[in-house]
Amino acid sequence: MKAMLVGAVALCGLFALTSCGLGNLQDMRSGLPGDKQVKIALKGNADNGQALVDDETKMAGFYELTYGVTRGVNGMVLVLLGVTRWIINQPPSEQPDDDHAVWGPTDPEGLERIQYKATAERVEEGHFVFELLGRPKSSTDEADYKAIYSVEYYRAGVERGHGTITVDRDNHKLIDPLNDDICETGSAVVTFANDGADSDKVVDIDFSQLDRSGCSDKGQMGRYHYAEAEDGSGDFSFSASNNIHQDNENKPQIETMTIRSQWTAEGAGRSDVIVEGGEVTTDLANCTTCEGATRVVVSQCWDEDFISRYENTSPAALQSLLLPGLDGQGALNPTGDEAADCAFQFAEPAPQV
């Protein structure tokens, strides 16, 4: 991500040219997706000034997990769209025709290793494609340019539309093999939609083709799903694989954790976390009171002030083995009445690693 931003800033030096008429590409300047199309509205401390809870209450740990993941992942999408809009709003270096424009290439200086350029195409009315490309500093061959990320967008009105963003880590590493920050291989694909009418705002990200086995934490992300209704209620799912027993050197295996969170327009919600595989499978097989369970489900519900009102696990026998630290505030404690204190019932998470 940092390298993408450096490339965008490097393009700035090329924009001293006098702006020419962009013809149909003016549609792209005014029509690329805005932040509202992908920005989430999950209620939280940053949005409503909610005070810190006192010692007699407990902020719902899974609410905070949901809030943090959605803010972090959607922040990545907002940065990519922001860089795209910034580039397109500069005068192009070339404009072969009304439907195409080129920004760059940059002139790398000093220790800079990459030469960047950006391209935009108006495929048809309301349909646009943007690419940020790079090639090694020493190259003079156009064929060496590789797309670091691309945006394809279909506009459906003001702040309305849908599209995809593809981030290609293989291409990025190919043109910048000395970049140690690129530990992944493969690509991540973002699909977003906010077409209005009765449809939800949706952001889906498929991380399953992004191999992180070469990264220091070796954690593998699966799929991310976020849907927001017009009233602000929402539904979120996310899956990842990692070692949940990192503090126990006798348990080195990788587990899969999948979370599904749902919340009302007022902010009350529920999270269900499913943990399976790795040493959890072994622990369940050795558990004489787990009644053949093959996974552990951890549930938590919170009220409109994001205070935990219901917590439980299934099977309960593995609680002491699994839960410490998993909610960010220490072990959960079974409490409350599910029917009375939960805004939602248990629902299977959608994504799988």
Image (cartoon, grey):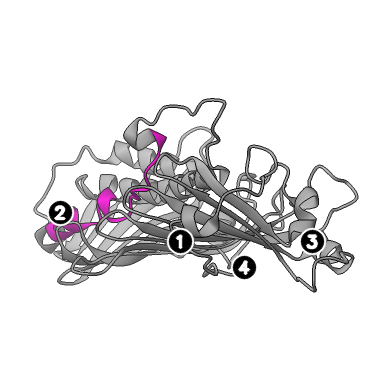
Q: Which residue is mark 3?
A: 280
Q: Is residue 245 left or right of residue 100?
A: right
> How many residues crowd mark 3 within 10 Å: few (<14), some (14–19), many (20+)?
many
Q: Which mark is residue 30?
A: 2
Q: Does the stretch in magenta take in 29?
A: yes
Of discs 4 and 3, which sits in the foreground? 3
Q: Which mark is residue 302?
A: none
Q: Could you say where residue 62 lies in the image, as x and y percent from the top left?
A: 55, 48
Of discs 1 and 2, which sits in the foreground? 1
Q: Could you say where residue 314 lies in the image, as x and y percent from the top left?
A: 69, 62
Of discs 4 and 2, which sits in the foreground? 4
- Return the disc, 4 or 3, that comes first in the chain's sequence: 3
Tell me the amino acid under the disc marked 2. Ser
Q: CA distance from mark 2 to mark 3?
A: 51 Å
Q: Which mark is residue 344?
A: 1
> How many residues crowd mark 4 within 10 Å: few (<14), some (14–19), many (20+)?
some
Q: CA distance from mark 1 to mark 3?
A: 27 Å
Tell me the amino acid under the disc marked 1. Phe
Of discs 1 and 3, which sits in the foreground? 1
Give the residues in magenta. 26-45
Of discs 2 and 3, which sits in the foreground? 3
Q: CA distance from mark 1 to mark 2?
A: 40 Å
Q: CA distance from mark 4 to mark 2?
A: 37 Å
Q: In the rendered image, is residue 353 in sight?
A: yes
The image quadrant that residue 240 belongs to is bottom right
Looking at the image, residue 220 lies above or below residue 92: below
- Return the disc, 2 or 3, that comes first in the chain's sequence: 2
Of discs 1 and 4, which sits in the foreground? 1
| CB under 8 Å between discs 1 and 4 | no
